Structures are given as C-alpha cells and as structure tokens.
Image (spheres, rainbow, N blue to C red):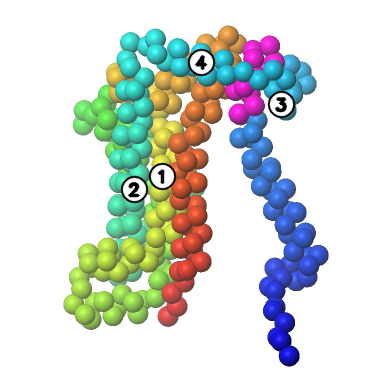
C-alpha cells in the first residue's frame, strides 16, 4: 500500500492551520497599513489632505507632491546629489563598522574567558534599557572637546557601536557549540582566525539581521546638533527642512516621508530571504 504523505499541522488540525493563517494575515495587514497610508497621503492633492473624516484612498491621485519635492530640492544652493551622497556614506560606514565591531566584541564576550566578562555582559543588558537621547549632551561635550563637530565623524563615530547590535551578535554566537571552537583551537588556529574563519560564517543570519537594523538606524541619522555645514547634512535633515513650512507643504512632507522609507525597505527586501534561508539551514548542535 502506498504510504500516505503526512502533512505537518502547525495548529494541530486543519482548522488550527486556517486560524493561524488568518491571524498572521491580519497582523501582516496591520503592519502594512502605516506604509499604505503614507503612500496614499503622498498621492493626495492639498485639498484632500485635511478632509475630516480622512479618506483611506486618494479621490484624485496626483504626483504633484513629488514634483514639488524635486523642484524644491533642485533649487537649493547645495546640489541634492550631495545630500544623497552624505546619507549613503554615513549609512555604509556605520553599517560596516557596526558589523565589524559588534561581531568582534560579541565573540570575545560569548566565547573567550577573561576576568570581568560576566559583569560586562550585565552592563550591556542594562544599557538596552536606555535610549540614545540621554547621551546627546555627553556626546556633544566629548565631540566638542576633541574637535569633530561639523565633520563626518560627528555623525558616524557615535553610532558605530550599539548595545543592541552587540547583544544580538553575542546571543547568536553563544548558541554555537564550544566543541567547534575547541577543535579549531587544537588545530592551531588563533582567536582572530577562529572568530573570522570559523565563527562568523556560521552566524550569517545574525549578520544580515544586524545589517538591516544598522542601515535603518544609520539612514535616519540627521545630525541636527552636530552638523551646521549645509554641504555635510544628510538627506533626512534636508527633507525635514523642506517639509517644515507649515500647511502649504503638507503634501511635500508626505512625499518626503515615502522617499525616506524606500532605502531601508529595499535593504530589508534584499536581506530577508537570506535571513530566512540561513536560519532554516543553520542550527549546529553539540
């Protein structure tokens, strides 16, 4: 007799599967709603933006808000391409630096035995409770003292290491079996080689996840308190300045919001499939 193919039931039954699917669908729609609303707002003409109750669709969709945004940006004395370069430069530098520093420090905290290791791990967990806003005054004092105000270092150096990135990498590296590292050590590999040739290829999911968060955070850096030179300002600051002209530019503000969302969404879409794939294929066991 032909054996019946068994189908894994995540909900315990077909009805449970359907219930889970409906729940996930509703959660997905709930999460997509702000993005949908932002796009719809950017396509509304000025007279529709202030209707009450607000409409969830554009009655007369137009691209005039994007045209006004481009025209306003083109009339600035600093080329708009300069602002794009600033943001891309800051985002790439911060993302790469976070990957390198967080991975190196996480390996040491997770797999290297040294005095004070547990205390440092506790300090990192405590710092997760605080937002970066509480550090602005101290950061400004330090940067003013060493003379990096109004330079690229002012909007890259404070963000190249984060508690969240370090915690994420440490938790993931901590799941790797110690036998893997001990075997490499017995074969004569040093700590640097073990870290980058043995451990890092096995934590690709964490790398990709951290890259998504790091790029998203770096793209939103505005540098209000540290950058005064117009040629060094990143694009979020410029778009906020363009849209901060009251009701007259409400449509431009909506268009600017959509423009700011595009790069992080592209990075997420490019990386999320790799994260799912590598998560499914990883899973070393002692």
Query: Which portion, as a residue range, is magenta?
Result: 38-49
Q: Earlier in the sequence, mark 4 or mark 1?
A: 4
Disc 4 versus disc 3: distance between alpha carbons? 20 Å
**Rendered image: mark on residue 146:** none
Q: Is residue 91 magenta?
A: no
Q: Position of residue 150 (x, y in %)?
A: 27, 24
Q: Position of residue 202 (x, y in %)?
A: 37, 66
Secondary structure type for disc 4? helix
**Rendered image: mark on residue 57:** 3
Disc 3 crowd rating (10 Å Cα; few below 14, some 14-19, many 20+) is some
Say if 121 sits above or below 155 in the image. Answer: below
Q: Which residue is mark 2?
A: 98
Secondary structure type for disc 3? loop
Q: Residue at x 21, y 28 (%)?
A: 147
Q: Residue at x 33, y 40 (%)?
A: 92
Secondary structure type for disc 2? helix
Q: Position of residue 216 (x, y in %)?
A: 45, 40
Task: Give the left or right position of residue 244, taking residue 158 as reference.
Answer: right
Is residue 34 something that shows in the picture?
yes
Is residue 132 something that shows in the picture?
no
Q: Earlier in the sequence, mark 2 or mark 1?
A: 2
Q: Earlier in the sequence, mark 2 or mark 3?
A: 3
């Amino acid at each position: 007799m032909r054996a019946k193919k068994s189908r894994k039931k995540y909900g315990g039954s077909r009805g449970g599967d359907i219930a889970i699917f409906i729940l996930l669908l509703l959660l997905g729609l709930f999460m997509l709603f702000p993005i949908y609303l932002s796009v719809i707002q950017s396509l509304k003409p000025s007279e529709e933006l202030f209707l009450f109750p607000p409409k969830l669709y554009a009655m007369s969709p137009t691209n005039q808000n994007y045209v006004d945004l481009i025209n306003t940006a083109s009339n600035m004395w600093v080329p708009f391409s300069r602002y794009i370069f600033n943001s891309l430069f800051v985002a790439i530098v911060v993302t790469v630096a976070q990957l390198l520093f967080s991975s190196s420090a996480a390996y040491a905290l997770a797999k290297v035995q040294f005095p004070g290791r547990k205390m440092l791990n506790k300090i990192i967990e405590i710092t997760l409770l605080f937002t970066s806003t509480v550090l602005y005054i101290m950061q400004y004092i330090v940067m003013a003292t060493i003379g990096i105000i109004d330079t690229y270092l002012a909007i890259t150096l404070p963000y190249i290491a984060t508690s969240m990135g370090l915690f994420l990498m440490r938790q993931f590296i901590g799941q790797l079996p110690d036998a893997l590292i001990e075997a490499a050590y017995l074969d004569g590999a040093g700590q640097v080689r073990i870290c980058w040739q043995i451990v890092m290829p096995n934590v690709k999911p964490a790398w990709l996840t951290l890259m998504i968060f790091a790029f998203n955070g770096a793209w939103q850096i505005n540098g209000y308190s540290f950058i005064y030179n117009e040629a060094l300002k990143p694009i979020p600051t410029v778009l906020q300045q363009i849209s901060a002209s009251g009701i007259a530019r409400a449509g431009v503000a909506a268009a600017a919001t959509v423009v700011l969302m595009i790069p992080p969404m592209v990075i997420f879409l490019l990386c999320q499939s790799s994260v799912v794939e590598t998560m499914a294929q990883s899973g070393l066991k002692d």
